[in-house]
Amino acid sequence: MKKRLLADDEFNKVLKLKQAGASWLKIQRDAGIPRRIAQRAYEDWARNQSFVELKESRRTVATEAFREHVAALINVGTYLAMNLDIPGTISAESPSGAQIVDNLWQKIVLDEVQDQTPPQLSGTLAERVSRSITRQHQMLFQSLQEHTRGELRWEVLEEWEKAWNQSKQYYAALRKEAAEVMGNFLRQENGLEKKINSGNRKGDGVTQIVVTLLGVIWTRILDGKLDLQPDIFEFQEGPRNEFFVAIRGDRDSVFLTYHDKNLAEKTACLGNNVARSLLLGENKDIIEKSLRGSVAVMKKAIDDLAEMLNPLLLRPIIFKTHCKLCPA
């Protein structure tokens, strides 16, 4: 038997009566429609309403989830742009460029870990929370790259990493040259190395001069203030017949202490001689071209990242693209 469909005016009568609390018998009597047909029409309508409401609810949830997704991606991009920098210290043992970038995602989670981990919980659980949140930020970063592939030149991040790795290599070469130059000067006076080492509690004063010298050179390259002429070290007179070796112009930078004024002066002079040999000698290209060149590449990459990760540029790109983490 063919299913009878109610006309709009008939169904409206049924709906009005049912919403007023009428029984199906009363609806049959008042509307003149068999109760089974009226009930079936009403139940079909109710099921359809539930589906429409569910669909609308899901659309609302998806819209909000996508809004949160976009905000998270922009936050990750902004964090990278604001926090990627050239380390203030460098050595052959420094982390690689890729490790430095990965470490950023570990730093960003510190506050979140504290928020999500009650103080009474064990350190092991805190570490698990930290790893979980770190992984979330790494996934968001990958998602940001997926959204912006073809729109942004992510090669600049690789250029930064490569330039940093090259800087480590140049630093290692410069330290080797500094050690050789230092050795040449020390051999000119028998016993001088032992005397200089006595000014450091660890007994490696000569090494400390080299490390401090290279640290000053690196810092001044970063600041764009590397002057090839003035001395880097000076000796200072202290209390109780003490004499110090420090970075010139910085009274808080004392790193060697002696009770012999002549030895302190000689040590500062030795450090300046090594500095001049490195800055003005045949190995100056390691500083002038190699280290300075790598720093210039990193600075440009940082500027480029800050420009391309501007939220005003990212937002429209993310809206028109899709990634694996996008809400359905």
Image (cartoon, helix red, strand yellow):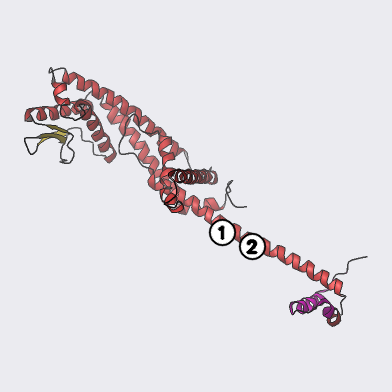
- Kind of residue sitting beneath label 1: Glu
In the displayed structure image, the side of residue 36 where residue 302 appears, left or right: left
Residue at 39% x, 48% y: name it.
Answer: 82
In the displayed structure image, the side of residue 1 where residue 80 appears, left or right: left
Q: How far apart, in angstroms, are the residues tagged by discs 1 and 2?
A: 11 Å
Q: Can you give x and y, in whole percent of width and height, for residue 136 in the image?
A: 51, 46
Q: Mark 2 — residue?
A: 57
| Element marked by disc 2 | helix
Residue 112 against residue 281 in the figure, above or below: below
Q: Can you give x and y, in whole percent of width and height, for residue 87 in the image?
A: 33, 39
In this rendering, does residue 45 appear at all?
Answer: yes
Segment tinted magenta in the rendering: 2-27
| Element marked by disc 1 | helix
Q: Which secondary structure type mostly characterizes the magenta part of the structure?
A: helix
Nearer to me, 248 or 291: 248
Q: Are marks 1 and 2 in contact (CB under 8 Å)?
A: no
In the displayed structure image, the side of residue 43 where residue 270 appears, left or right: left
Looking at the image, tell me whether mark 1 or mark 2 is earlier in sequence order. 2
Residue 322 against residue 163 in the figure, above or below: below
Residue at 25% x, 37% y: name it.
Answer: 220
Instruction: Assess whether residue 301 is covered by the magenta stretch.
Output: no
In the displayed structure image, the side of residue 111 where residue 194 appears, left or right: left
Nearer to me, 8 or 201: 201
> Dividing the picture into quarters, in which one does residue 80 lie?
top left
Q: Which dot marks residue 213?
A: none
Instruction: Assess whether residue 10 is covered by the magenta stretch.
Output: yes
Q: Can you give x and y, in whole percent of width and height, for residue 310 in the image?
A: 44, 51
Q: Mark 1 — residue?
A: 64
> Dividing the picture into quarters, in which one does residue 58 lie?
bottom right
Q: Can you give x and y, in whole percent of width and height, for residue 294 in the image?
A: 35, 33
- Kind of residue sitting beneath label 2: Ser
